[in-house]
Amino acid sequence: QVELVESGGGLVQAGGSLRLSCASSRSIFSIPVMGWYRQAPGKERELVADITRFGSGNYADSVKGRFTIFRENAKNTVYLQMNSLKPEDTAVYYCNARFRDTPYWGQGTQVTVSS
């Protein structure tokens, strides 16, 4: 069982930055892959970025060069640093953990980017 709690969303102007945090109830070093997904109104949930337990990151083409995913094992927390935000980044962002073939999700945090 893994419980995930996200924080850090909010309203920001285009070009601005936000950092999302995902705190895990389980040691994140025991979780092979953790990631961030997002879902905009009327659209399917999509992968934004994920990171392996050894720190290897993977990004959607739409966020490469602007977003960075990283993890702080001592705090059992995964972060998503989002820079140069665009209105099309507006969505609910969800933290995800894949542990023992089971996906776990946080409750989501709203990110709104105004033009």
Image (spheres, helix red, strand yellow):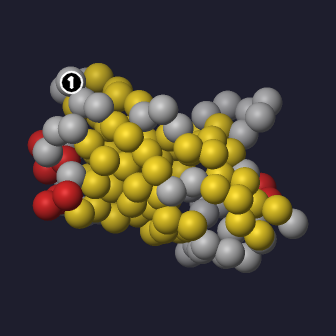
Q: Is residue 91 above or below residue 106?
A: below
Of residue 22 and residue 96, the one placed in the foreground of this image is 22
Read off the residue under disc 1.
1
Q: Quadrant of the C terminus?
A: bottom right
Horizontal arrangement in the rendering, residue 23 relative to residue 63 (left or right): left
Quarter of the rendering containing residue 92: top right
User: Where's residue 40, x and y in %?
Assistant: 72, 40
Q: Residue at x 41, y 31 (%)?
A: 105
Q: Is residue 77 above or below residue 97?
A: below
Q: Residue at x 28, y 54 (%)?
A: 77
User: Where's residue 13, x and y in %?
Assistant: 77, 70
> Does residue 47 appear in the picture of this structure?
no
Q: Residue at x 51, y 56 (%)?
A: 8
User: Where's residue 60, x and y in %?
Assistant: 56, 55
Residue furthest right in the image: 115
Q: Quadrant of the N terminus?
A: top left
Of residue 59 and residue 41, the one placed in the foreground of this image is 41
Q: Is residue 114 above or below residue 93?
A: below
Horizontal arrangement in the rendering, residue 81 relative to residue 3 (left or right): right
**Number of marks drawn:** 1
Quarter of the rendering containing residue 38: top right
Q: Secondary structure at mark 1?
A: loop
Q: Is residue 108 above or below residue 86?
A: above
Horizontal arrangement in the rendering, residue 104 relative to residue 18 (left or right): left
Q: Residue at x 61, y 72 (%)?
A: 17
Horizontal arrangement in the rendering, residue 93 relative to residue 13 (left or right): left
User: Where's residue 16, x and y in %?
Assistant: 68, 75
> Does residue 80 appear in the picture of this structure?
yes
Q: The residue under label 1 is which amino acid type?
A: Gln
